[in-house]
């Protein structure tokens, strides 16, 4: 049994601190760091922090791609990327000043031949394995790529977790993904409604369950999260703490749930660990560590059944 993550468009995330950023002028940083980035990669990194190995799949290119791979190996991640001949993996610039500003690169073109190589790797997954599909689809790939992956693996006993938005998410539901994790804003966008309270969020989470998802987490940032596994709908308030960096918090929630489920915990307990892991990343400059997650788990109430 193994966990695989897919990041179609990995990145090097260049995070720059500028105390008083002034557009149009020369600015000097007060600090800077470089990390491997991408939603699936974040899941793999947090899983490793929680003591669970995974294999990171996706596409890389050029000198930036080689650096992403090197940094993952350095952090104990097993990368099994497809190396593209042309272009280079993107660099995302994240500027932290009075306001946060992001400039995300485009990344390399992904050909049909390269995509077929990924499908061949996915064909090697076995019953009981986990597959995490996270993030958007690059413009050079077919818009139904997630749907095609779930269709290809349908009926093989693989637990597929999808963290995506709108049509990318809705179109995979007929293939019964093991877990989906929209946030409350994405949930409202899917159904074109305004969600005013937890009761309404629970109602529409159940609609996603009826449409095919086996488990649904709706994250609500500082307002906590709602979860349904078909046996009920549960709410957990967010633990108290100062939000330092929200980047990667949603990916961390997915990793926390996956790790707990992988270790055989009940769904409601996996949900609780997901909330703790997402919050631990939000309260830290880096992605959540095992100690940080365990500290928050001790302070979290048991999920409250609301339906």
Image: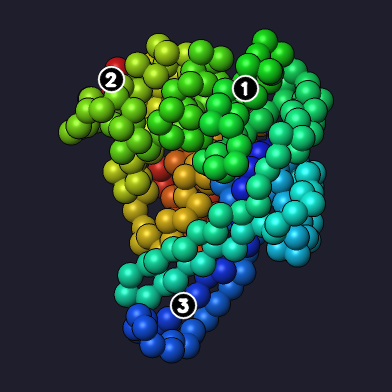
Across and down, in percent, residue 283 comes to 44, 59
> Could you say whether the residue bearing mark 1 is in a helix, strand or loop?
helix
State which quadrant residue 87 falls in. bottom right
Checking the image for residue 266, the label placed there is none
**x, y percentage for residue 284?**
48, 62
Distance between the Cα atoms at labels 2 and 1? Answer: 28 Å
Q: Locate residue 211: give its quadrant.
A: top left
In the rendered image, residue 270, in percent from the top left (x then y), is placed at: 53, 31
In the rendered structure, are the residues bearing label 2 and label 3 in contact, judged by CB atoms less than 8 Å apart?
A: no
Answer left or right for 188 relative to 286. Answer: left
Indicate the position of residue 191 as horizontal and vertical percent values: 29, 24
- Mark sitting earlier along the chain (2/3): 3
Q: Which mark is residue 203?
A: 2
The answer, for residue 266, to whether it is visible in the render is no
Q: Is residue 125 left or right of residue 280?
A: right
Q: Of marks 2 and 1, which one's residue comes earlier in the chain?
A: 1
What is the CA distance from the residue labelled 3 to the residue labelled 1?
40 Å
The residue drawn where x is 54% and y is 15% is: 176
Point 44% across, 63% down: residue: 102
- Asked if marks 3 and 1 touch (Cβ < 8 Å), the reply is no
Q: Residues within 10 Å of mark 2 (few under 14, many from 20)?
A: some
Q: In the rendered image, which residue does mark 1 sit on?
A: 148
Say if 12 sits above or below 49 in the image. Answer: below
- Mark 2 vs mark 3: in front: 3
Pair 3/1: label in front: 1
150 to 75, vertically: above or below: above
Position of residue 171 in the picture relative to residue 21 (left or right): right
The residue indicated by pointer 3 is 17
């Amino acid at each position: 049994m193994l966990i695989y993550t897919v990041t179609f468009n990995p990145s090097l995330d260049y995070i720059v601190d500028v105390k008083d950023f002034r557009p149009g002028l020369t600015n000097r940083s007060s600090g800077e760091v470089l990390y491997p980035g991408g939603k699936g990669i974040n899941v793999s990194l947090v899983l490793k922090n929680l003591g669970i190995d995974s294999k990171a799949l996706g596409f890389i290119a050029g000198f930036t791609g080689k650096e992403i791979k090197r940094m993952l190996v350095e952090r104990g991640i097993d990368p099994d990327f497809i190396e593209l001949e042309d272009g280079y993996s993107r660099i995302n610039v994240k500027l932290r000043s009075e306001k946060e500003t992001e400039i995300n690169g485009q990344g390399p073109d992904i050909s049909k031949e390269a995509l077929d190589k990924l499908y061949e790797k996915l064909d090697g997954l076995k019953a009981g394995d986990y597959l995490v599909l996270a993030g958007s689809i690059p413009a050079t790939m077919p818009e139904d790529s997630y749907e095609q992956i779930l269709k290809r693996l349908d009926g093989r006993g693989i637990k597929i977790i999808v963290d995506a938005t709108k049509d990318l998410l809705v179109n995979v539901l007929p293939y019964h993904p093991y877990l989906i994790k929209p946030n409350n804003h994405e949930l409202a966008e899917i159904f074109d409604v305004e969600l005013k309270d937890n009761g309404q969020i629970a109602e529409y989470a159940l609609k996603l369950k009826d449409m095919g998802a086996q488990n649904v987490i709706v994250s609500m940032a500082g307002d906590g999260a709602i979860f349904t596994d078909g046996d009920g709908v549960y709410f957990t308030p967010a633990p108290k703490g100062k939000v330092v960096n929200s980047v990667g918090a949603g990916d961390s929630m997915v990793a926390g749930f996956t790790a707990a489920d992988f270790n055989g915990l009940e769904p409601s307990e996996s949900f609780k660990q997901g909330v703790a892991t997402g919050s631990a990343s939000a309260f830290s400059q880096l992605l959540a560590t095992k100690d940080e997650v365990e500290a928050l788990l001790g302070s979290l109430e048991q999920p409250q059944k609301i339906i």
